[in-house]
Amino acid sequence: MAADPPVGGPASELRGRRTECDVLDRLIEAVRAGQSRALMVRGEPGVGKTALLGYVVEQASGCLVARAAGVQSEMELAFAGVHQLCAPMLDHLDRLPGPQRDALRTALGISAGSAPDRFLVALAVLSLLSDAAERRPLICLVDDQQWLDLASTQVLAFVARRLQADSVGLLFAARKPCGDMVGLPELVLEGLCEGDARALLDSVLTGPLDARVRDQIVTETRGNPLALVELARGSTRAWHRAQAAPGPAEDVAEELERSAGRAQARGGLPAAAAFLERSAILTPDPARRAQRLLAAARAKRDVGALDAALGLLVAVEAGPVDAARTAEVEYLRGQVALMQQRGPDAARLLLSAARRLGPIDADLARETHLEALGTAIFAGDLENPGGVVDAAKAARAAATGTQPPRLVDVLLDAFALRLTEGYIAAAPTLTRALELALAPSGVDDGRRLWLTGARAGAITALELWDAESAHVLATRLVRDARDSGAVARLQFALNTLAWTHLVAGELTTAELMIDEDRVIAEATGNPALGNARMTLAAWRGHEAPASELIEATLREATARGLGRTVDFAAYATAVLNNGLGRHHAARDAARQAFERDQLGYGPFVVPELAEAASRTGDATLVSAALEWLSERTRVTPTDWALGIEARLRALLSEGEDAERFYRKSIARLGRTCVRVELARAHLLYGEWLRRERRRVDARQQLGTAHQMLATMGIEAFAERARRELLATGETVRKRRPETPGELTFQEAQVARFARDGLSNPEIGVRLFISPRTVKYHLRKVFIKLDITSRNQLDSVLPSDPGTLRT
């Protein structure tokens, strides 16, 4: 752990670096005081970066010091840098949470296992450093970061951004920060000033030097310390890289292929991609070369090198003709298009790939058909060639696969029937698909699937107006994503689960899901999903932020051809405007989404459309919505569907019939977890009673609606109920939903998870922070809420009024 001797003498004798040393002194003191710091020391070769790291070693008395350095020859070895840095701490691996421990052991080659998720590896390193810092403040030094392997760069950049209340300092030195390191706080090193450069030069000279030569050396080296020393010694800081270019050699190609397999088993996809590409180049047999190029393209796709993947696919097509390989090329092109958020292009490519696979592999073809259909559905491409209708027709024409049918097969049949023959024809198959998805063994065995399992099951549950099943499947999706560490899936799962909490009136819990998605996005550099956040703002009735989110979503979705997301925005617009009493705008927005009839949208869109159309005197449109819904209740008579159907009949009725339907709507919805719609049923009934001049009865319904809506935080609709109550002569004050006193958002998250019984390590895993940071936040929570233990959190934190829990 000793520092390398710096150029020009010991670190304590650094020339011209007093300002830089002061910065490093403050960093060390902050770490000793229990704070975390991350810093990138940046500058050209020889400017003194390594010397400053040596200075830190000398000054860090009382601290643990761990060191690593990037090595050019190890850049393709996944987690090589992490192994260097963490080696002195690996005896404490057993203190980590199980999934993190297993992922890090596999990544470092300590134990065998399936390829670990890089996010779990990053969490493991974060926890390991935090644990080491519990004993003594920890300083981690990483030199030559520009030569660090990609996996280690991603992990250490994640750690640098997630350290908070840990006594850990992370210092990187690089010529130019690259990859995920860009954006860290920087200390930029320039050449020495003229006076200091002259002094350093004089200190290493062994004899007299002409003043003009000295001046020329100082000028030409621009004060670079290493250049000054090397020129003075009469030597050359030149690096020579020579790489042989051998001809085709199958033995070398095979060894590279084996190396790729070993790298991939350790989660080193970038290394695997590089090995496979080089292996393909050295392969003499054209057919085998094409297969290796295809494997390299898959690896490039998985690491996000999408343009490189497309380039390799062009090379694959130059090889011998092979039907299966041609289908795979098209499939991969569709996957890349999907990752690039070119939904319509992706759907058309995947559909073409599915058709090509039909004569070759029926099971694989059906999986690809489902992926193509799901992509078309989410793109909202209803009528164009290769869009939803074409994909559904092609799916129906596809050959049957494994018997008995798998979940993927039943889902494919259900969605294809729904889109080609309508709801009544599809209802039995949709019901069967939901049964399979809810079964304990509802995990499909498909080799590559996009819209399956709990994800497609949740859409199926919404098609069947089954909120409870949708919540169960979304919860399972979140749990599975957490257990596997698949953060991209976790983002989608959290947003799906947030929707089930929204309809339950649990806006606070939904916000936690949505903000956890944002935290993951910030930690990984991936975009956050905006649909649930936009809808949450609309339900709360926050006009300015909701309108801003809706407009931004519309712009992005329109530019990318994502019609389903456009409909999400239309639905959110309808919710916002119905709450604010702008029913014409709500009607027009809801009608747009209603007419496109996207899968799973009906339970959300129909109530908005019917209310807005009724308030604007458009009975024809209310009748159209009722006809649409009645078709479904004939074969899917759930309480949710029947409750909304009764509401629509009430809106079209008068007198005793209207009252009977309002009461029936409240009774049906009261048996469900869809508490938002129950509250609105009370509101609509109360508004009708007031118009009938039955003030006493109206006050009871409006009071219930106001209390429910205000408690949920559905502020615009709650204000509607308050105004109606005032019109009945009732006195009522504006009420704001309860919020924890002065807690920050992250403190509130930590407090709620602690209230629900999660340990500090478990909370850390959920929020991507270290257990020590969790402990730090909890101390602040206790002080702000004037409590002394976790057991008291339940009495001081507000609970959501609904019944759904993750």
Image (tube, rainbow, N blue to C red):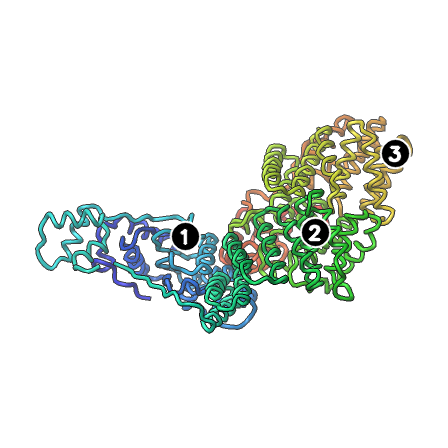
Amino acid carrying mark 3 in the image: Ala
State the residue position of label 1: 178
Residue 491: image location, x then y, percent: 60, 52
What's the mark number on residue 406?
none
The kind of secondary structure element at disc 3 is helix
Distance, label 2 to label 3, CA atoms, is 42 Å
Q: Earlier in the sequence, mark 1 or mark 2?
A: 1
Residue 196: image location, x then y, percent: 19, 49
Distance, label 3 to label 1, CA atoms, is 67 Å
Residue at image point 30% right, 66% down:
2
- Judged left or right of residue 520, residue 575 is right
Residue 485: image location, x then y, percent: 58, 60
- Judged left or right of residue 541, residue 73 is left
Picture quadrant of residue 698: top right
- Judged left or right of residue 22, residue 596 is right
The kind of secondary structure element at disc 2 is helix
Residue at image point 40% right, 67% down:
246
Q: Give the quadrant of the N terminus.
A: bottom left
Q: Earlier in the sequence, mark 2 or mark 3?
A: 2
State the residue position of label 2: 373
State the residue position of label 3: 658
How packed mark 3 is, by other alpha carbons closer than 10 Å (few <14, some 14-19, many 20 or more), is many
As drawn, 478 above or below 589: below
Picture quadrant of residue 706: top right
As drawn, 149 above or below 567: below
Picture quadrant of residue 397: bottom right
As drawn, 484 above or below 801: below
Q: Nearer the viewer, residue 527 or 185?
A: 527
* 3 or 1: mark nearer the eye: 1
